[in-house]
Amino acid sequence: MKKNISPSFSRRSFIKTSALVGGGMLIGFNLFQACKPETVPPVDISQLNFNDFNAFIKIADNGMVTIFSPNPEIGQGVKTSMPMLIAEELDVSWNNVIVAQGALDTKNFTRQVAGGSQSLRQGWEPLRQTGATARQMLINAAANKWGVSASECKTENGVIINSNGDKLGYGEVVKEAVTLPIPEKIVLKNPKEFKIIGKDIPNVDIDKIITGKSLYGMDYKEEMMLYASVLRPPAFGKKLIDFDDTSVKAISGVKDVVKFGDKIAVLAKDTWTAMKGKKALKANWTSDSKLENTEDHDKILINLLNGQEFNTLRADGDVKKAFAEADQVIERIYESPFLPHNCMEPMNFFADVTAEKVRLVGPIQTPAGTARRVAQLLGRDPDSVSVEMTRMGGGFGRRLYGDFALEAAEISSIAKAPVKVVYSREDDMSAGIYRPAIKYKISAAIKEGEITGYHLKEASINSNMYGLIPNFFPAGAIKNYQVDVASYQSEITTGAWRAPYTNFLSFAEQSFFDELAELIEVDCIQLRLDLLQKVKGTTDEKIQYSPERLENVIKVAVDKSGWKNTKEGVYQGFSAYYCHNTHVAEVADVIVEDDMPVVKKITCVVDCGIVVNPLGAKNQIEGGIIDGVGHAMYGDFSFTDGEPQDKNFDTYRLIRINETPIVETHFIESNIAPTGLGEPTLPPAGAAVANAIKASKGIRLYKQPFIKHIKAKELLG
Amino acid sequence: MPVYNLKVNGQSHTVEVDQDTPLLWVLRDHLDMVGTKFGCGIGQCGACTIHLDGSATRSCLLQVSMVKNMEITTIEGLSEDASHPVQQAWKEVDVPQCGYCQAGQMMSAVAFIKQNKNPNKIEIRNAMSGNICRCAAYNRIEKAVEVAASKMS
């Protein structure tokens, strides 16, 4: 039943142990790179540092297990699910496991970035191997004590049992275990033996969250710390000429005003005074070039789509020929606006820059990269910069960028004081690193009722789709297939936003297939299934979606959603997508109330391999889908003369509870290694809703946000 | 600078702040009660929801000079040990993702359930629509309010 792990993974170089002075054993381990040979875990638990190890497991002499996990928690639940993997193979009861947030120094971390829904997927093997190694060490220690062979011993919930039925608790053998060599040969459990993986485990921080404890960067406070509110250029492309801070300095509690680059920071004794001080600043701005407008972007991107300047990311067969020989060509354009991330916790960061060192604390998805950039900015030795991570009030990609941490470091360096930069909501929404506005043109060549050619063109602000995205469905299913991209360089900063590119590409393609099915008069499900047949057995390594798994989620979704078998007045839309290594199908149920579509329910079928923590996984799925529905329906963000037109929730609309569909989740049972869930349920949601709106009101949507374009279409008749 | 006496979670506090300082920032920066969150500053997101004499109120818009002699309750005052039925329901349903908005959500829920002991789904949705959850844990918030209401009735 047990699976031997190949010896190529040398545990000795990844795992080290020490005996703790207060009793108990400490295991330090590295997940993705070997520990340096000379490193050993500390003997004092208060001296944990994460420079040499990714994480620590403490096994106390009473058998309690504490996992010190420095992984950032944004809300995807990895702080709960990753320790579950260790505990499973260590074979302890979850009730005896404590998960502690490790303070973090960052130098040697390899995988610290929470992004791309990869944490669980990448940690799946190494975290279990670590747990299994620790378990084997404890078994070996007990076997030595008993004078029996380790192979005669087994474990059960933190207890080692030999063939005579003798028992020793883990805590009783930690002293011996720590003196033994790290075992090279370990066995991992067969998934059928899992006791923790696959169980509903509540969020490990739940008590702290529901009692309002200090957890987030926004809550972080130090003695003598000043609060900084920053005035930034009011529009992208504007630069500071000069400013007048006379009335700012008259405000009681304002401690300093600091100019850095084109920004001015007001430092004060508390947040409110800093914000008031910022409002009292008078600044003059200029610009070298024409400031940007959404209307201009729209024209530029359409021109790019209609032009000839593309990078080709994938080309199969001869698309040109297929289109020339087609009986019918169908071409559609899909358009999306910029989107701000709007994490509930506005951006913030603490910095204390002194002659000796640079100390940074706050919510960040990329501590190591940020530490490097701060060192570079201040001209400091990277070894003197440390970043400690706090819990994050949402990320969605925004906290991959350390711009706010750099601001804090620069202000602290100039003011020579510990400083926390706090963004107001207006700051957060107008100094964004937005999801870029993107347009797609999709064309299909039809000959004798078959799709013979498929041409996807992307025109985007600043950057284009990357990685394996051009090889997602329907790549491999259509003989003549091409993906071309073009971009326009803008002053407006853009970056990753939950499920980059696919968050809108999925809407475009899955809407296109729905319309294509209608036009060539085939069932929209059958069209997808027929295409998937053609991908089966592909030897193309770039095609990483599985036609079988995608087919399966589609069929289960048809079944579970009561597809085309709904009550009168309920209209359905279908969508299926693969991204972030996960296969998803969604069906939206829409009704019409007061002549407007209302999304009542989304049925979602997910194949993410083994579901580590179903309770947490469903939360991600529900959130991802409602996020996808919300932004597709309401998310609108535009610029006039380089200035964002919405700066707070009075005009910028986020989905609220009374507009929310109920999400019904079904998992595909699987023994395949788990894949991520933070992102992949979002992309299909928009198309499922749009296709249902088409079914209900007869309106085919090509642009987001839907609400705006439904109204526009109805006015035009 | 003026001095204010505040009654927060049954305890008296004295703070010296400008009269226009919102209660939110008095709680967070001066009284070290950081459970009440800053989200928008204009009363649109509900992250800063507290109770003023038992009614749910946005603390980001409430100047400290206006709350003299009033009972202020924050998330920290619901219970110290997470035993309030709304906290219990939030735990049972495992509501939070990032968790940042949840104190405000719970304070809205407590005030609402006090008014309506047996709410239906539409009433729950309407009552909770002033609180944004960017992680969109809305299905669970809805469920948790239901569970909490049944615990409190």
Image (cartoon, helix red, strand yellow):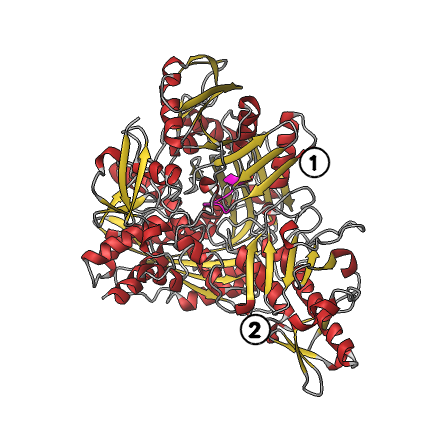
Marker disc for residue A383 = 1
Residue A563 lies in quadrant: bottom left
Badge 1: residue crowd in 10 Å (few <14, some 14–19, many ≥20): some
Q: Tell me the amino acid under the disc marked 2.
A: Lys
Q: Are marks 1 and 2 on the same chain?
A: yes
Q: Position of residue A42 (x, y in %)?
A: 70, 53
- Image quadrant assignment for residue A140: bottom right
| Dot 1: element | helix
Task: Give the magenta-colored segment's residue range.
Answer: A391-399
- Numbered tag placed on residue B54 in the rendering: none
Look at 25% across and 56% down and name the residue there.
Answer: B124
- Whether residue A546 is visible, yes or no, is no
**Label 2 belongs to which residue?**
A195
Q: Does A6 appear in magenta?
A: no
Quadrant, the N terminus of chain A: bottom right
What residue is drawn where x is 60% and y is 71%? Answer: A92
The chain that hosts pointer 2 is A
Q: The disc labelled 1 sits on which kind of residue? A: Asp
Label 1 or label 2, whichever lies nearer to me, is 1
